[in-house]
Amino acid sequence: MRNRLKVLRAERDWSQGDLAERLEVSRQSVNAIETGKYDPSLPLAFRIADLFGLPIEEIFLKD
Amino acid sequence: MAMNPAQRRYIGRMIPVSIAYVAAIFLASSLVPNGSPATPVTVAVALVPGLAVVGFIWAMGSYLFELKDEYVRLLEVRKALIATALTLGVCATWGILEIYTNVPRLSIFWVFPIWCVGLAIGGLVNRLTLGAGGGCP
């Protein structure tokens, strides 16, 4: 699954650490999601969507 | 990298359990000579290091349950699965060798150390495949 996390983060001028802190996860989690090595659980995907104020499908895209 | 609360609690448990393990090994080694008959006293003394090993396992299990970060938990679970596969593979293969040949007998004492080596290998596999080893050793 692809995602727009890196772009959305860059638009807000957040580092991976900033985003990790806001999501209460590790920086390596953010990095793994951004690079497509890990697809987050539905609860975490909803937390990400809430944080960016976007629907999940505008952040996570089907391959 | 800063430790998360689960990692801090894990370290906080592992340090006293490790001290207890080393102390129990020294105590058992000094009080019970190798090959002593199994009496209630020798068994009781020799069981103490075993309880410390149970403490290691308890600390590791608690860490997995308390981890809030799902990705780090995935890394740890992968490590544990790799360690379990390695331990089962080594022990079963060696056991068959023992049945059919006169290779030296592997004491079951080594099962837990082999599993711990497997954890380290699991961390390496994580690093090679996902770019991150995991949280705690």
Image: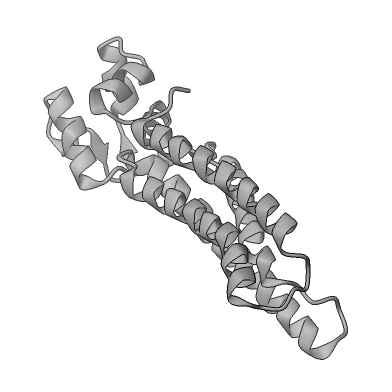
Q: Residue furthest bottom?
A: B100
Task: Name the residue at 30% across, 34% down.
Answer: A3
Nearer to the camera, B19 or B31: B31
Task: Name the residue at 58% across, 40% down.
Answer: B127
How many labels sit on residues? Answer: 0
Above or below, B27 against A44 in this view is below
Nearer to the camera, B44 or B8: B44
Please identify the quarter of the rendering in which residue A27 is found: top left
Can residue A2 be spotted in the picture?
Answer: yes
Please indicate whether residue A45 sits to the left or right of residue B88 in the image.
Answer: left
Please indicate whether residue B51 sits to the left or right of residue B70 in the image.
Answer: right
Coordinates of residue B124 in the picture (x, y in percent): 62, 44
Above or below, B27 against B12 in this view is below
Please indicate whether residue B39 sits to the left or right of residue B4 in the image.
Answer: right
Q: Which quarter of the rendered picture does the C terminus of chain B lie within? A: top right
Coordinates of residue B3 in the picture (x, y in percent): 43, 27
Coordinates of residue B66 in the picture (x, y in percent): 32, 44
Nearer to the camera, A15 or A56: A15
Please identify the quarter of the rendering in which residue B67 is found: top left
Q: Residue furthest right?
A: B102
Task: Name the residue at 61% across, 53% down.
Answer: B116
How is the structure coloured here?
one colour
Coordinates of residue B55 in the picture (x, y in percent): 48, 53
Can residue A1 be spotted in the picture?
Answer: no
Q: Residue furthest top?
A: A13
